[in-house]
């Protein structure tokens, strides 16, 4: 997404704070102490708001026929995923998985604009600054939810009709079926805010064709509509107006197998010819991406882009020059390692990375530049790729011992 799409909701769900509430090196000065106190008060307000009674539930969990239906119901903030929602969705998924009266699970977003545009980053930011356990609990439980979806024993169908980013990707991409529409907007733009593409990005991105996943991860490039399926992120494409009929047919099925669900989705896809004549948006750049992004380091990729001289390469070099150098290096190594790991092992790795990002500076600076001051002029630290040492990157991947994520 463009980094101006959201204010209170955002597509980055990737930051942790270590137990023990150690303050980041960026927050040691005395002004930072008062900043921390302000964060504590802001966090208390956010938590109080989360605990207050809502007119509408933030997530609807319904049984329709023999289908479990999850509806993320925060349309005003593009169905941003918060801690309350995670804590409702996870136990319900486990319950339905064991329930003989439930054959399939469908997950969707309310409001017509978004499936889920990501995690509620405001609460996470304040929790991180205040050293509050909310951030730690949020990501630990979010990643456990992502893993549960990846290992789900019953057909899991995500109707990604609208904006699908960050945490929303984690709720959909690991499931057996992902149905995109012409309204789907997919992106993992975390490097622009001092983070990395988490929620299992280290698993699914390197498994895309060629260097496409690395390209998407570093640049935050946005895929729309049918291109989300063409890239391999969605399993099917169905026109948005047909989604209600598709959903009705799915919930009306009697004891469907995964093959039965697949046949229904295939039939609706065949009825959807919208944009089918258009080539994949990156079609003419696929070989360029594979060539330019095949370097053995982020510095090498930048050198390739600058030496290439094409308009496409110049544009990508310009985009990468604005991203957090530390984030890009973490992301490069994350995808390299993730290509050979299982989803659970990737999530353990990403939990370590998220903790490291929370201890650093770039996440807070990225949020300031994009969401708070909105000057879109972050001052990254370190400010250049060359200043980011291999040792500092390696440290981000270090075991957390007893604080590591476990399933």
Image: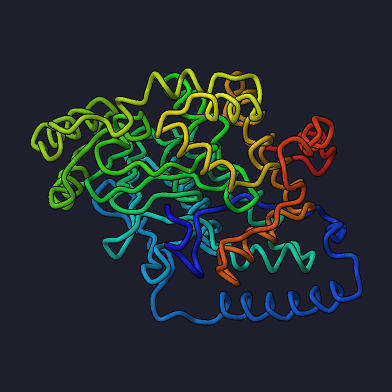
Residue in front for this viewpoint, 397 or 86 = 397
Q: Is 311 on the left or on the right of 23, as rendered?
A: left
Residue pictured at 73% horizontal, 81% vertical = 41
- Quadrant in which the C terminus is drawn: top right
Q: Position of residue 55 (x, y in %)?
A: 40, 81
Scheme of colours in the image: rainbow
- Where residue 75 sits, quadrant-wise, is bottom left
Residue 345 appears in the rendering: no
380 shown above or below 218: below
402 shown above or below 58: above
Q: Position of residue 102 (x, y in %)?
A: 34, 44
45 shown above or below 187: below
Q: Is 189 on the left or on the right of 242, as rendered?
A: right
Q: How many labels does the image show?
A: 0
Residue 320 appears in the rendering: yes
Residue pictured at 63% horizontal, 48% vertical = 195
Residue in front for this viewpoint, 35 or 234 = 35
Q: Is 341 on the left or on the right of 379, as rendered?
A: left
- Where residue 236 sits, quadrant-wise, is top left
Residue pictured at 58% horizontal, 32% vertical = 202
């Amino acid at each position: 997404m463009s980094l101006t799409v959201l204010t209170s909701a955002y597509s980055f769900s990737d930051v942790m704070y270590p137990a023990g509430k150690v303050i980041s090196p960026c927050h040691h000065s005395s002004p930072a102490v008062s900043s921390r106190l302000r964060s504590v008060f802001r966090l208390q307000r956010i938590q109080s708001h989360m605990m207050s009674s809502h007119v509408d539930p933030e997530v609807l969990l319904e049984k329709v026929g023999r289908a479990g239906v999850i509806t993320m119901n925060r349309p005003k903030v593009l169905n941003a995923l918060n801690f309350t929602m995670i804590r409702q969705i996870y136990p319900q998924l486990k319950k339905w998985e064991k329930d003989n009266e439930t054959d399939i699970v469908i997950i969707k977003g309310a409001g017509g604009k978004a499936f889920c545009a990501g995690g509620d980053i405001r609460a996470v930011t304040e929790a991180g600054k205040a050293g509050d356990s909310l951030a730690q609990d949020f990501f630990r439980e979010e990643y456990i939810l992502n893993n549960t979806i990846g290992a789900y024993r019953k057909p899991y169908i995500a109707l990604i009709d609208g904006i699908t980013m960050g945490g929303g990707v984690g709720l959909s991409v690991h499931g057996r079926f992902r149905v995109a529409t012409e309204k789907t907007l997919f992106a993992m733009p975390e490097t622009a805010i001092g983070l990395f593409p988490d929620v299992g990005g280290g698993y699914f991105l390197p498994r895309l064709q060629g260097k496409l996943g690395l390209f998407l991860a570093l640049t935050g490039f946005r895929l729309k509509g049918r291109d989300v399926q063409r890239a391999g992120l969605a399993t099917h494409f169905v026109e948005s107006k047909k989604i209600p009929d598709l959903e009705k047919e799915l919930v009306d099925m009697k004891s469907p197998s995964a093959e039965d669900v697949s046949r229904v989705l295939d039939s609706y896809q065949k009825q959807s010819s919208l944009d089918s004549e258009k080539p994949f948006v990156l079609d003419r750049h696929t070989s360029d991406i594979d060539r330019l992004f095949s370097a053995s380091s982020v510095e090498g990729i930048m050198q390739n882009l600058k030496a290439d001289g094409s308009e496409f390469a110049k544009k990508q070099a310009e985009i990468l020059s604005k991203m957090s150098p530390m984030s890009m290096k973490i992301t490069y190594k994350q995808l390299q390692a993730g290509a050979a790991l299982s989803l659970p092992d990737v999530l353990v790795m990403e939990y370590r990375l998220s903790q490291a990002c929370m201890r650093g500076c770039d996440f807070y600076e990225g949020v300031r530049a994009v969401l708070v001051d909105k000057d879109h002029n972050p001052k990254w630290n370190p400010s250049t790729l060359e200043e980011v040492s291999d040792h500092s990157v390696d440290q981000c991947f270090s075991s957390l011992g007893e604080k590591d994520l476990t399933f």
